Image: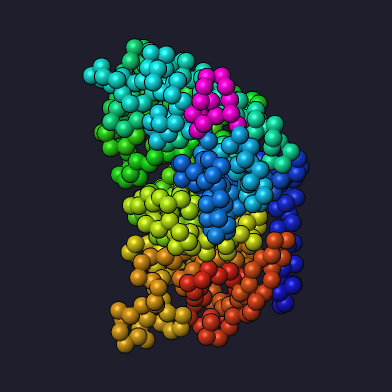
Amino acid sequence: MTSNRISRRVSRRLAPLVLALAASGMAAASGELPRIVAKNGRHALLVDGQPFLMLAGQAHNSSNYPGALPKVWAALKDAQANTLEMPVAWEQIEPQEGKFDFSFIDTLVRQARENRMRLVIVWFGTWKNTGPGYLPEWVKFDNKRFPRMIDKDGKTSYSHTPFGEATLAADRKAFVAMMEHIRKIDAKQRTVLMVQVENEVGTYGVARDFGPKAQAAFEQPVPAAVLARQKAPVPGAAQGNWRQVYGDYADQYFHSWAIASYIEEIAKAGRAVYDLPMFVNNALRDPFPQPAAPWNSNFASGGPTYDVLDIYKAAAPHIDFAGPDIYMPESHKVTAILQQFQRPDNPLMVPEMGNAAGYARYVYQAFGMGAIGVAPFGIDYANYSNYPLGSKFTDRRMVEPFGKVFGVFAPMQRQWAQWALEGRTYGVAEGDDRAAQTVEMKGWKATVSFREFQFGERQYLKDKNEYQSGTEAPNGGLAIAQVGDNEFVLVGQQVRVKISGAGPNEGKPSMWARVEEGRFDTGGKWVMERNWNGDQTDYGLNLPAQPTVLKVRLGIYEH
C-alpha cells in the first residue's frame, strides 16, 4: 500500500471524529474563545475550533519585563515551543492603588504574535509559591487592612489569610481589570489561551489560619458541596463541623476549602468579563503513601494536592483544572503524579516541570496519557539556573532535550491532540530502573525496552553489560497513537518496541505489514521518508536518539 493510500485511510478515520465533535458542539467556529472540552474522560483545549497541543515553556519569575523578552523568545524558538507561560504580577500592573499599568501586557501580546507564539498568563496575585512576594507594596506592608494568617500559637504568619475581605476585593479588582484589558486587545486574535489564577497556593509550616474569622468558619458545618465530594479517609460524623467530619485531616481540608473559595471569587469575576479557561497549579506533596496521611508540616497545606482535588472542584467550579508542578525527578513518582491528576473531571496538564534533561522523557509519557500541554520551567536564556530543581545550564544545552521532543510533535500537534481527545494515545517514559514496560492497547500489546542496540538481541552480546551509547542516564520515551484497529503512530527516542496480539488477537500470529518512517506536515498529511524492513524490523522497532515518527500497520495470518 502506498503512503498516499495510507494517508487517505488515516484521514478517513479522522473525519468521523471531526464530525462527531461538530455534532456534540465541540467544534467551535474560528471566532470562538479557547475552551476545554471532554469526551469519555479525555480532554482537549480547543483553539480556533480544533484541539491544540501546548508545547509550552514557562519563563523565569523575573523575566516578565520587556527588556527580558528577547532572551525568552530565543529560548522558546530553540525549544520549538508554540506557547509561552508568562507571569504577570499584581505589583507590576497596580503599583499604586487604583492606577493600572498594562504596558507590559501590551508588549507581551504584540511580541507573542510577532514570534508566532500563544500565551498563558500566570497571575501572581495574593499568593506566589504560598507567599506575598508579588503583592504591591501598598498591600504587602499594610497588615491591618490586608491581614496575614495567625498560627495556632497566636503568631502572625508570612502568608495572607484567605479570610481577608479587603485583600480578596483588591486582588479581584486587579484581576478583573487585567482580564478586561486582555479582552480589549486580544478578543479577535486570541493570542492568550488560558489564565492561571494565583501560583502554588497553600502555606508551609502552618496548617491553616487560626484567626477569629477563620476559627468561626472552622466551627461551622462543612458545606454540603464539600460533603458530597470529599470523603473522610477515616470515617467520622456524616455531617457537622470540619473536625467532627474529617478528624485529623480537618485543618488541611478546611484550609483547602478556604483558599479554593477565595480563588473561585477571583476566577468567577474574571471569567464574567472574558471567559478564558482558568486553572490552578500545585506545589506537590509526595504521591506516596496512599491513602495520604494527615498534614504534618511536610507539604503546603491548603494547595490543590491530589488528595483534596474534590474540595477544589466543590469550592471553585470556575477553575477548569488543577495541574501538577513536577519537580520530583524519580520516575515512579512522576508516573503516580500524572495518574493522580488525570481524572475524568480534571484535564491533565503539567504547567511546570523541571528543565533538567532527565525530565524531557516525561513529555512522551504525559502526551501519551492525553495531557493538553506540558511546560518545563525556566525556558529562557536569563543567566539564572534553578538547579537542583532544574538544569545547571542557562544556554542551548538546557533547551535542547526539550526542543528535540517538542520538535517531533510540532508538525502533528493538532492530530495528536485530536487522537488524545479520542482516548487513542498511550505513553511511557524510561524508568529509573531501566526495566521494560508493557502498554495494553485495543487488541494489541506493546513491549517497550530500553538501552538496546538497534540490531540483535542482548543474548547475542559477549559482554552483557555493554549498552547503547548515550543511554548512561534514562532518556527514552515513547508515545503511541492507535489510529486504526491494526494501525499505530509511534513517536519516541531511545526505545525498542515490539507489538503482539492481545485480547481478541492474543495468540494469533502477526507481523509487520508496513513500517514507514516520516512525518506529518502542517496540513495533516503523512509524508514518508522510507519504509523499514529487514534489519530495521527483525528485532523490533528501534527508535534512535533523534526523536522519530513511525507509521505502523500490523497484519495477522492464520495457522
As drawn, the residue found furthest toward the front would be 67
As drawn, the residue found furthest toward the left would be 153
Q: Where is residue 168 in the image (x, y as percent from the top left)?
A: 48, 20
Q: Where is residue 495 in the image (x, y as percent from the top left)?
A: 46, 70
| Image-based side of 449 in relation to 18, left or right | left
User: Which residue is pictured at 61% across the width and 74% down the height?
Assistant: 517
Which quadrant would the N terminus be assigned to in this image?
A: bottom right
Judge whether residue 302 is colored magenta: no
Q: Is residue 17 visible?
A: yes
User: Which residue is pictured at 73% across the width and 61% down the height?
Assistant: 523
Q: Nearer the viewer, residue 239 or 412?
A: 412
Q: Is residue 440 above or below residue 450?
A: above
Give the prevailing secondary structure in the magenta stretch: loop
| Image-based side of 381 in relation to 511, left or right | left
User: Which residue is pictured at 63% across the width and 57% down the height?
Assistant: 413
Q: Which of 266 and 444 is in front in this view?
A: 266
User: Which residue is pictured at 65% across the width and 30% down the height?
Assistant: 181
- Colour convention of the picture: rainbow
**Looking at the image, how many numbered discs can be counted on the residues?**
0
Q: Where is residue 423 in the image (x, y as percent from the top left)?
A: 58, 53
Q: Where is residue 27 in the image (x, y as percent from the top left)?
A: 72, 45
Image quadrant assignment for residue 398: bottom left
Image quadrant assignment for residue 525: bottom right
Q: In this view, does 288 lie above or below 415?
A: above
Residues drawn in magenta:
89-102
Which quadrant would the C terminus be assigned to in this image?
A: bottom right
Q: Can residue 276 be seen in this view?
A: no
Judge whether residue 92 is colored magenta: yes
